[in-house]
Structures are given as structure tokens and as C-alpha cells.
Amino acid sequence: MTQEELSRYLEQAARTTRVWLPSRVIRSVGYFPPLQMLEVEQRGRDYRKILQFFGVPNTALEELVGATSAAAYFYQKLDGVYPVQKVERDLATFKEPPWRQGERTEAQMWGWK
């Protein structure tokens, strides 16, 4: 894949929104086919983080979204299986869903900013 193709795909992904999941552990997910990257927004009682898993087949997104327990699928089939990178909300590949806009950042939650 050339740099130009990658740039075009990243621009396309930036216009794509992660899909919300009704889970207490996973808030939203997005999939970027050219890099086989699954972006997962995790949530907890007092934290939010975005993880990018690489080399994930596209069927994993369908299975994750369709699982009776997204958290169980995440911990059994993704976490520890694929290379992962934690990213800041501002550096995420996918834009935030509309319901996330105006929400406090982790730093603001803890009074760091």
C-alpha cells in the first residue's frame, strides 16, 4: 500500500464513526479494513481508553457486535491475542460518536486540566 493510498484510507476512516455497543465494558468499536485494525473504546467506572488491535480479521467485528456478551468475547478472543496499542482520544482513527461530544476527557475527570 502506498503512502497516498494509506492517506486516502485514513481520511475515509476519519469520517467514519465507531459503532456503539450496549456493554458495560466496551463502549464503541470501529474497523479499518486496509490495516485490519479494530478500534475498541473501553469504559470503566472511572476511566475511558481506546485500544487499537492490529491484524484482526473483519469477521471479528461481526462476532463482537453479535456476541451475547461483548466483554466476554473481547477478553477471550481479542485481548492478548492480537498486537494492541493504546491511543489518546484525540489520536483515535475514528471520530467520536455524536453522543460523546461535549463529554469530559479523562484528564478533566480527574482534575488534571
Image: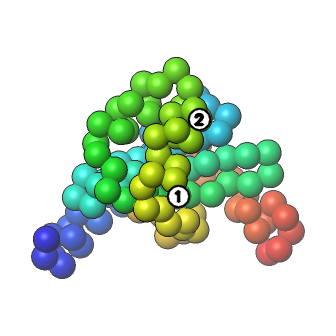
Give the residue displayed 29% in from the left and 36% down from the top: 59
Mark 1 element type:
strand
Q: Is residue 12 visible?
A: no
Q: Is residue 25 visible?
A: yes
Q: Quarter holding the N terminus? A: bottom left
Position above or below: 62 against 68:
below
Crowd band around label 1 with a 10 angstrom C-alpha radius: few (<14), some (14–19), many (20+): many
Give the residue displayed 46% in from the left and 40% down from the top: 77
Mark 2 element type:
helix
Position above or below: 7 against 49:
below
Under mark 2, the amino acid is Ala
x then y, percent, for residue 112: 83, 74
Give residue 71's mark.
2
Horizontal placement of 93 versus 70: left or right? left
Give the farthest residue toward the top. Answer: 68
Give residue 76's mark.
none
Give the residue displayed 37% in from the left and 38% down from the top: 61
Which residue position is annotated with label 1? 51
Under mark 1, the amino acid is Leu
Could you tell me how many numbered marks the image carries? 2
Q: Quarter holding the C terminus? A: bottom right
Position above or below: 99 against 68:
below
Horizontal placement of 35 versus 1: left or right? right
Position above or below: 98 against 110:
above
x then y, percent, for residue 109: 81, 60
Dot 1 or dot 2: first in sequence order is 1
Q: Quadrant location of residue 70? A: top right
Give the residue displayed 74% in from the left and 54% down from the top: 47
